[in-house]
Amino acid sequence: MSKQAFEKFINPKSPAKIKEEFRQEKRKIKAEMRAEGEERRRIKAAKLRGENIEPTNTSQNKNNYQNDNKRSNKFSDKRKNNTFAKSPSSEKTDSSRFEKKGDFRKTKNYGVKNERFVKEDEGKKEEMPLNKFIAHSGVSSRREAAELVKFGHVKVNGDVVYEPAFKVSEKDKIELKGKPVHLQKKLVYILLNKPKDHITTTKDEKGRKTVLDLLKGINDINGIYPVGRLDRNTTGVLLLTNDGELAQKLTHPSFQIKKIYEVGLNKPLTKEHAEAIANGIELEDGFIKADAVGYADTKDKSIVGVEIHSGRNRIVRRIFEHLGYEVKKLDRVMFANLTKKNVERGKWRYLAEKEVRLLKYMNASLGKKSKTKVE
């Protein structure tokens, strides 16, 4: 297979472009957070003064600010020429208005955070939804944790809780099926180049080899589990972590995480079938289409590259089987912009801090953009 031809098919974004997109997204989020912080401080200051005010729309404030700037520029020349008439009241300085009893400038507590608010804020920071707590403990993903709670497998301080959004903290005693659950202090991110004949799970009742058997050199693998699934005979990129929140987002359909597979077929893929895969076909569990399809090797049209974001079970194999092909080889070459470069089959490596950061920023960015439900 021509490696160069397949790399052309993948055509990933340049690292510089990805970084710049993340920087822009980060700046936007920081600006929004600053605006929200200013709004919260304004409301708290008003409460300390005994006033009751309603929150303002920050986006409306931005528009008003821009309009004010336009107006100020428009009349700047008139101000310079002193063409505005002064009102009689403006000539006098009303110093008495600064001496009112209720004025915030005279209030001792102005600018000093009330102890009651400090305690409330600290409590809120410590608390989190029950399913999020379980996910952060490395037991399962956030979605799976929600199911465990709904089925009554979780106790909080001795009582069964059925609501995943129930607020808990580290001070609470959390039990899952009778075993205590604690938050993970150290998060681990591992990229594995999965070989054949290994099950993508943490345990196998039939005693078959699992992907965790390949993680040699890690002292404590408790809480580490694979993100998503690869069939027993499917090879390639597999992410493992104990970060339940990130795992849940990477596997949730709404985030549309990109996956690229190299597919080896028993016969050349026809142009008509390639177009059908790109346009979409109807399977027994619903409609599906690939994001991109191409020949990985122009000389051998039985080797195909497929880009897809669906996480449905055995979806790539089922697409080709539906069209009358037999999949001889299936290798995932990319998952969420992670590749198996410089990682031999059956070997693994830790993700670099930069890769983890990009994963999380990409995750946040995609989460905001995806508004519609997808497969």
Image: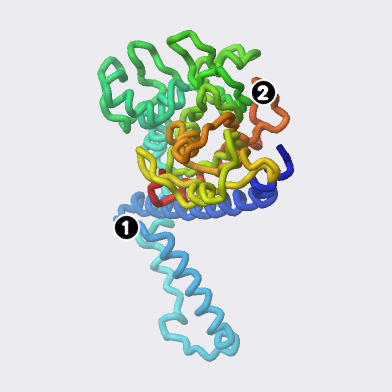
Q: Residue at x 37, y 28 (%)?
A: 131
Q: Quadrant of the N terminus?
A: top right
Q: Residue at x 25, y 18 (%)?
A: 159
Q: Secondary structure at mark 1?
A: loop
Q: Give the residue type that dot 2 points to.
A: Arg
The x and y percentages for residue 101 are 34, 58
Of residues 258 and 306, the one drawn nearer to the viewer in this rendering = 306
Q: Which residue is mark 1?
A: 53
Q: Is residue 334 left or right of residue 64?
A: right
Q: Which mark is residue 345?
A: 2
**Visible residue check, residue 243:** no
Of residues 63 and 136, the one drawn nearer to the viewer in this rendering = 136
Q: Residue at x 64, y 13 (%)?
A: 216
The x and y percentages for residue 202 are 49, 17
Disc 1 or 2, which lies upstream in sequence?
Answer: 1
Of residues 240 and 149, the one drawn nearer to the viewer in this rendering = 240
Residue 312 lies in quadrant = top left
The x and y percentages for residue 45 are 39, 52
Q: Give the residue type that dot 1 points to.
A: Ile
